[in-house]
Image (tube, grey):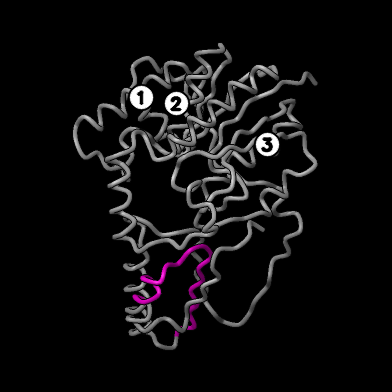
Amino acid sequence: MEQHSVLVFAYYFPPMGLSGVQRVTKFVKYLPENGWQPHVITAGPTAYYAHDPSLLDELEGRDIVIHRTSGTDPNSLLKDKGTLKMPREWVRKLMRAASDTVFIPDNKKGWAKQALVLARELVKEHHFDAIFVSGPPFSSMMAAAKLSEETGIPLVVDYRDLWYGNQFHVYPTPWHAHRHKALEHDVLVHASRVTVTNRRLKERLIATYNHLNFEDVVIIPHGFDPDDLQETTPTVRNDGKFRLTYTGIFYDIVTPIPFFKAVKKVLTERPEMALELHFAGILRDEYAKVAKKYGISEIIHDHGYCAHA
């Protein structure tokens, strides 16, 4: 098999945890056996809401080179604080609004500048057949596009979320919205191919940017890693309990409060129901207090953030 080399920009990467790291981590894991050696540019020690070293362990022994660089982004500046506690939702929204007002396209632009500096050094030392970048953060897309423009190396841009028009993004003024759209257009002009996680993203990009056609944007859905399931033995239960499990975090309009209200109503009408609620991820204290208010704390099992396995 002919061997190729790809330079990967990935701010969110193990040992950071949560959902943002998984897509690129699994791509990188399987690239070597498909003829591509990845050189990954990622963040150095950072403070974050969750860390999962086990995801990094999966990459050990594979033909993968990881380069780490720090920047002036908030996570890098707070690196000594390790695992951060997720703030209350109103505080998080306020912090997000302030960040969206000051930083365009995002508050990782300080890291993206350092990543570009490192990338310029790497292209002097290695031959790369492609550049791959996944966003968010979208500042890393800008850095990768700049490198592609300077070197002529083909660029593949991967969207895990929408950039311009993202439903969670705050545009304080029309100028902010216009600026985001212009920056994204500039990145996409330099992209040889665009990959997205779903059809809605593809349709939105093609509708927004006239130079993109159907063939330019390829859907690669989120999948699963067969290795994760090889040693899994299903647990068979026959205790009459009905279990509901939520994995992940809650933010913005994603909230468990309506669900808690529904559970309260069901248990009021059917107190004999044997119900268990399981949460694996980050269930913030404010939501645990709501559960207590509704009298359902006893049936909640909060497992906290778990290693990937």
Where disc 1 sits, the SS reads helix
Which-is-in-front pick, marks 1 and 3? 3
Q: Residues within 10 Å of mark 2 (few under 14, many from 20)?
A: many
Where disc 2 sits, the SS reads helix
Residue extending farthest to the left is 173
Which label belongs to residue 196?
A: none
Whole-percent x and y of residue 25? 63, 42
Choose top left, top right, bottom left or bottom right for residue 207. top left
Amino acid at dot 1: Leu
Q: Is residue 274 magenta?
A: yes
Whole-percent x and y of residue 59? 72, 43
Q: Is residue 44 magenta?
A: no
Q: Residues within 10 Å of mark 1 (few under 14, many from 20)?
A: some
Choose top left, top right, bottom left or bottom right for residue 205. top left
Horizontal arrangement in the rendering, residue 247 relative to residue 100 (left or right): right
In the rendered image of this protein, does residue 245 appear above or below residue 105?
below
For the C terminus, the image quarter is bottom right
Mark 2 and mark 3: Cα distance apart in space: 20 Å
In the rendered image of this protein, does residue 259 appear above or below residue 135?
below
Q: Which residues are magenta?
A: 273-290
Which label belongs to residue 66?
A: 3
List the residue tagged with mark 1: 183
Q: Are marks 1 and 2 in contact (CB under 8 Å)?
A: yes
Amino acid at dot 3: Ile
